Image (spheres, grey):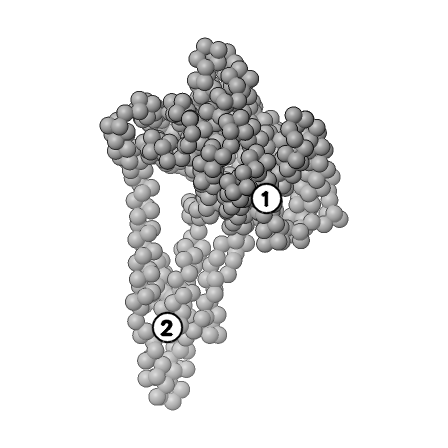
Amino acid sequence: MSREGKLLKNTFIISIGTFLPKMASFITLPILTGCLTKSEYGTYDLINVLVSLLLPAATLQIQAAAFRFLIDSRGKDKDIKSIVTNIVGFIGPTSFVALFILFFCLFNQPISIRVFICLYFLADIVVNAARQVCRGLNRNLDYSISAILSAFGKVIFTFICVYLTRKGLLGTVISLFMASTFSLIYLVFKAKLYLYIDYKCFDKNLLKEMLKYSWPMVPNSISAWVMRASDRLVVTAVMGVTANAIYAVANKIPSLLNLAQNTFTLAWQENASIVSKDNDASEYYSSMFRTMFDLMAGFFGIIIATTSILFKLLIRGDYDDAYHQIPILFVAMFFFSISTFLGGIYVAYKKSKSVGITTSIAAAINLIVDIGTIHWIGLYAASGSTLVSYLFLFVYRIIDVQKIVKVKYSKKHVCLVVLLIVIESILCFLRRPFLDIFNIVLGITAFFFLNKKFVGTVIRKVSQMTHRQRKISSSVDTDSNTKELISDEPGGYKKHLENRVEPILFSDKHNCCGCSACCFICPVGAITMVEDDEGFLYPRVNYDHCIKCFRCKNICAFKEDQQKRGYYS
């Protein structure tokens, strides 16, 4: 399978596990905004923000090292056990110490809420580490399913604990804890992670090496947290919890753009790490940068065009002031998405310090602009400072990454696309029905224009798959009567088989897409799909059972290439 094919496959699998949890947030949003007071919702939002700060601080981001180190250790059981054991041995005691401190820091909350907040944080730390291990072991499907279970759990438990029982903030925290625990139980037993824990494999030197890679990611995570949370903390301190609730709601719809970015980034980090060892890495990164830039711009255009509709559908209560923050946050999230893509290249070359430095500078800019302008322009200071910091992060990284590997791009194209995004945001900000209709047309047109090559490729792939399925369904059993006719001759069928060459499905893995069509079409079950070292399925023929009917060759999408090689006539 090609590099693009692997990236597309991983993106699709991970997107399932990324999209549904985000959708769960939107599904539960009407319940939370309807059942919680503004003060409770503001506190709930701060809890979600704090978990993104506590997790990297308590674990020194060692789960990030787990993902990156496991990629290089695939197929090496002893190394895998050593890495997983080191992770468990490290995050266990550090998490308990951090949560013990957190419990007493939350002195203004009732004990029941403090207990469940700590339990939720612990479950979230462990389940995130387990998911990164699964990603490193190329078990992306398990990763996604665990996230799906967490999403369903969040919806179900929120409905029970918040809507039905009216437990308010306590019910909300309990639902978060139960959802994370549900997901963790699945991962531990489905992926059998407990088999990789062997304290005889604990290696202090390896732990030091992993921490050397991971600790620079801590300031990166904290800085990223600062850029997301400092706005809310400053808004809360200066304007109150109610204003923070409005700003939190304003962030919900732009996070749809972040959803697409997160999905791609998770798959991109793995793909970029593998490609970093190839000779054509620079050309590949340049091509992917253009593709990703245009895709995100296209998604952005469609989402922003439907903002007014989404706002009416998803937001309940008196949050109308949040609408005008959304266009500014849209532009900010776009720059953040591209910056995260470039961050994947840093991860590929294990340049974790560069990730931390660039994010830290951007976080400082965000905080300075926010504090310096909030007394003048109020809530716009929060969204404006976010835009300025993410714009700086994008510009800094696109220049700095050239020191590692050359990523070619067109400055003219980048500027024109950014201008288009600004125009769409202005149209959204004006909030006029006829402009919204125009914006929808503009967004859809821009998406197909920017991504015409990508859309064309998708259409061709879908067409090929549909054609193969039709061919399987309508395939005529041409060999069913052949056996009966030839068997009338003495030794006829056996002689017939001996005179035919054996089918060779592919000469190279690049000539196989792993679609399983050959496996399904085989009338005697002589073909099975076998997993290779990278976890991808490829067909294998049992020639002892093969009747040489060549249906597998006829159904193959690459049969023309194989025919040129003389494998069958």
Q: Position of residue 149 (x, y in %)?
A: 53, 48
Q: Position of residue 265 (x, y in %)?
A: 48, 37
Residue at 55% x, 41% y: name it. Answer: 165
Residue closest to the eye, 362 or 408: 362
Query: Picture quarter containing residue 555?
Result: bottom left
Can residue 217 be seen here? The reply is no
Q: Classify residue 427 as left or right of residue 271.
A: left
Q: Classify residue 6 as left or right of residue 416.
A: right
Can residue 40 be seen here? The reply is yes
Residue at 45% x, 67% y: name it. Answer: 527
Q: Callout 2 environment at 10 Å: few (<14), some (14 to 19), or many (20+)?
A: some
The extreme right residue here reads: 200
SS category of the residue bearing label 1: helix
- Are the residues tagged 1 and 2 within 8 Å (C-beta)? no
Residue closest to the eye, 367 or 519: 367
Residue at 72% x, 37% y: name it. Answer: 93
Q: Callout 1 environment at 10 Å: few (<14), some (14 to 19), or many (20+)?
A: many
SS category of the residue bearing label 2: loop
Specify the amino acid type for callout 2. Cys
Residue at 71% x, 41% y: name it. Answer: 89
Q: Residue 549 carries which label?
A: 2
Specify the amino acid type for callout 1. Met
Residue beneath label 1, please?
178
| Up/down of 324 relative to 134, above or below | above
